[in-house]
Image (spheres, rainbow, N blue to C red):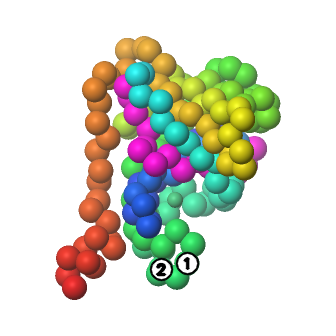
Amino acid sequence: MPSFVVQEHHSRRLHWDFRLEVAGTLKSWAVPKGPSLDPHERRFAIRTPDHSLGWAKFEGEIPAGSYGAGEVVLWDEGEYHPLKPQDPEEGLRKGILIFRMSGHRLKGVFALVKLRGVPKKDAWILIKKCDVFARTGWRIPILSDGFQTRLKKAA
Ligand code: MN
């Protein structure tokens, strides 16, 4: 089964990078509020450039001055199972991907749906489907206060 990774990223604005292994690369979305286990929550997800599979293990600080400068923390990892369509490349083209996640935090069925008519931005919505892993009112655990935040406190 292909892998997935979610990285908590304390760059200029905190967000979660949601990455699915597809055809030997990590297809990526930046999710400002992070994924949710609450099926009532529709999480905005902006498509970002593909990353290499090796990036899935990255944790640490992206240095100041570099793109995405700030702390990266591995938030979740595991495997995912494409359900519909069964070929995720086809799903990416069509703008809809339904898949089952087997992570430590993210479990059960999710959908990624591309928004139509959003100019310029490649905008998608990440939604938890109703199943035994759905949690109404779930709140995302933030694992780090961020390197930059700590720097500010120290200054
Ligand atoms: Mn990021």
Residue found at the far left of this picture: 154
Residue lying at 25% horizontally and 73% vertically, measured from the top left: 150
Which region of the structure is painted magenta? 23-38
Residue 46: image location, x then y, percent: 60, 47
Q: Is residue 68 left or right of residue 90?
A: left
The residue that disc 1 covers is: 66
Q: Which mark is residue 121?
A: none
Question: Residue 25: where, in percent of width, then height?
Answer: 70, 51
Secondary structure under the numbered disc 2 in the rendered image? loop
Q: How crowded is mark 1: few (under 14 residues within 10 Å), some or many (20 or more)?
A: few
**Marks 1 and 2, how far apart in space?**
6 Å
Mark 2 neighbour density, 10 Å: few (under 14) some (14–19) many (20 or more): few
Q: Position of residue 104 (x, y in %)?
A: 38, 37
Q: Count numbered badges in the picture.
A: 2
Instruction: Please state if 142 lies on the left or on the right of 26 as rendered.
Output: left
Is 148 positioned to the left or the right of 108 in the image?
left
When the figure is inspected, residue 76 is found, relative to residue 86, above or below; the finding is below
Q: Which residue occupies the foreground of this view, 118 or 132? A: 118
**Residue 140, percent from left and from top:** 32, 41
Whether label 1 touches label 2, CB < 8 Å:
yes
- Specify whether residue 45 is painted magenta: no
Q: In which quarter of the image is the C terminus?
A: bottom left
Looking at the picture, which amino acid does disc 2 mark? Pro
Which quarter of the figure is the N terminus placed in?
top right
Quadrant of residue 138 in the image? top left
Indicate the quadrant where residue 13 lies.
Answer: bottom left
For image coordinates 57% across by 72% down, the residue present is 67
Residue 28 falls inside the magenta stretch: yes
Residue in front for this viewpoint, 19 or 44? 44
| In the rendered image, the vertical position of residue 143 relative to residue 4, given as above or below | below
Circle on res. 63: 2
